Amino acid sequence: MKPPSHQQSVMLHTPLFRGERRLRIALVGMPNAGKSTLFRAVSSAAPRSGELVGAGRAYEECRVKIGLDEASLIELPSFESLSPVSERDLPALKYLLWGNERPDVSGHEPGEPPAPFRAPDLIIQVVDATNLRSHLELTLELTELGRPMVIALNMMDQAWRKGVHVNVSALALRLGVPVVPMAALMGQGISELFRTATEVARSARCPLPQPLAAHLGRNLEGLMAALGKPELTAAFRLPPRLLVMQYAVGDRYFSDELQAHFPGLMPDLERLRAAAESGLPRPLAEEVHADRHHQAAVLYEASARLGPTHEGRDWRYWLDELFLNPKWGLLGSLAVFAAVLFVVFEISTWLDSVTAARLIEMVSAWQPETLTAVVARAVADGLIGLVGIVIPYMIPLVLLLVVLEETGVMHRIAFVLDRAFHRIGLHGGIAVPFLLGLGCNVPAIAAASRVSAGRERVIASVLITFVPCSARSAIILALAGKYLGGFGVFAIFAMTLLVIAVMGTVMARRNPELGPGQVQEIPPYALPRLRTIGLETWDRTRDVLTIVTPLLIGGSVVLALLGHFGADAVINAALTPITSWWLGLPLVLGVPILFGVLRKELSLLMIYQALGTFDVGAVLNVVQIATFLLFLTFYVPCVSTFAVMLRTIGRREALASVAISVGVALLVSGAVRLLLEVGRTVVG
């Protein structure tokens, strides 16, 4: 999830497929093989769609990032056979062969080419592992197209449950085509599939057609020689054997084009075809199909076998069912976050009682009167506030997030959230920065800038500011946990999800130009290493010592001096329309609201100082606490967050983000306050 703090060497594969050199990959397969599932797993939030000219059948196309490479992925309509090709499948075959550049034999055809982009550099055939034998016949046809190819052996999880054992290496060796086992619905094997695809494209390895049966090969030698002439190869721009096989099975399109462009050859071709058929036990077309069926059966027998169904399922299976299953994945993700909040809440309550609470009790009798004593008490309050935020609330939350990343759970949550993120105009790769945002918005926005571009980067950066970072979470847990209970904590976090969903939907509709899709990695489960957990936790919390500590102490001193000299009253009076009129809060909270932009942790300390007590519940009622927490959760991100936004999305968008956050904070907190006040009146 988060890149390690130490540097790593990265092997750079060349040439890079980017920009105008990006790969073009065609996704093909039989019906119900999982082709659309695979496309949706890696596509952008708004893939482009169109119709193949001449067929009226839809295709979808989007850009996809594959590490440092990029590809245009085209999902073609499903088809069962290309030999002979049906009229409805002919445009798809034309695209696979020629793209938007017509060969000489089809230059006379009216209208546009089937698709408005060049032919694919590589073909990925999605194959149902539970029905492998029938899919292999299409595989044999595709190997004759002369394009680099990879087989995505999908639904391996279902094949495993049904007792279908596939020897992937044996199948790849016999076909001469890389075979990648996967389960697209669960996100497993997808990253390996596209890594393999880029490697095959770089090497430009094309599969060799499987050898024909000896008797069929002998009988087709005459047609092979006649249709392998250079002028025919140049006119059709396709491998000679493909033309022979299409003509042998009586493909109408290729036969008509031969008749139209090479009428002088037709008598010889018909004679050779008849001669080939005369030496066979059945019509030539049937013999070709029988041979292909036999080859598929031999491949299947050599690489697959049926065995007893697998009954034993270990803990990895059940965890993947919980986190990656489309039916339960979102619930599983929510359960993880609920468990994290519960654990942190329980641990934090105890830690708070043995750390900050005891320190507060120790200094509670200290009532400074001189300027020096006021500053000293302010420094002490700042240090107590630091302890009360970091030890009980921030460290446990960050620690648990690091553990989730190290075990591989967070990557699975990110994959499942991909489906939800598409609804707000973002791809699933953005889920990782959003999850990082629970620790700190600063690295989250920086991570979002690395995996997105254009308007999508802006949308992601703005929405991340609404993710409750560990500082805001600490305040929510500290106040809501004490005075609103577990339900209040859950309600505030649920409100952030609702606001992100609504704002994302609105912004995506206003900004339709979105970035490429993302191939996400689903690593195996792993036991977290204590050293890694410690280093990562320190890496994410060390800013508290270097940045937050002086801000907390300095802010505490400034606030104490403002109160000592009476200047805080001026600021509080100026903010009266917001604090008192709109939010219904005491006037003294104006300064904590204003200074909260320095660092969110500072707000909690300032609340204590402004109210003159660490027992907030003695001064504020439940409605006021809920209103204040919601406003603090959504309004202006801290200065460091604003600074990174200036670098990543520019001044105009960063200032717009501030305006949006203030507006959302006022709207949400004001609306909730109104609802709660009405509820209290009705109940009362």
Image (cartoon, rainbow, N blue to C red):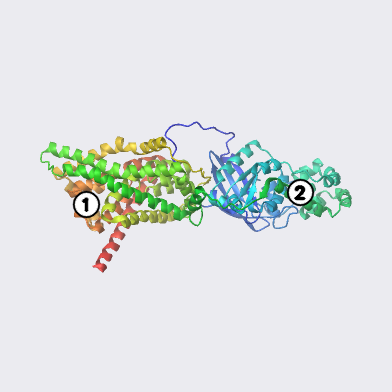
> Which residue is rendered at x = 33% and y = 42% of the image?
395
Q: Is residue 360 left or right of residue 186?
A: left
Quadrant assignment, res 442? top left
Residue 414, given in percent of the width and then of the height, sits at 47, 48
Q: Mark 2: which amino acid? A: Val
Callout 2 environment at 10 Å: few (<14), some (14 to 19), or many (20+)? some
Q: Please give the count of numbered marks on the rendered protein.
A: 2
Viewer-side label of 2, 1: 1
User: Residue 543: image x %, image y %?
Assistant: 33, 37
Q: CA distance from mark 2 to mark 1?
A: 83 Å
The residue singled out by tag 2 in the image is 105
- Rendered image: mark on residue 637: none
Instruction: Name the residue type under label 1.
Output: Val
Q: Quadrant of the N terminus?
A: top left
Residue 598 visible somewhere in the drawing: no
**Tag shown at residue 616:** 1
**Dot 2 and dot 1 residues touching (CB under 8 Å):** no
Q: Position of residue 394 (x, y in %)?
A: 32, 43
- Which one is nearer the viewer's eye here, 172 or 121? 172
Q: Nearer the viewer, residue 507 or 205?
A: 205
Task: Please state the horizontal and vertical placement of residue 187, each as a whole percent of the image.
Answer: 54, 48
- Tell me if 418 is positioned left or right of 223 in this view: left
Q: Quadrant of the C terminus?
A: bottom left
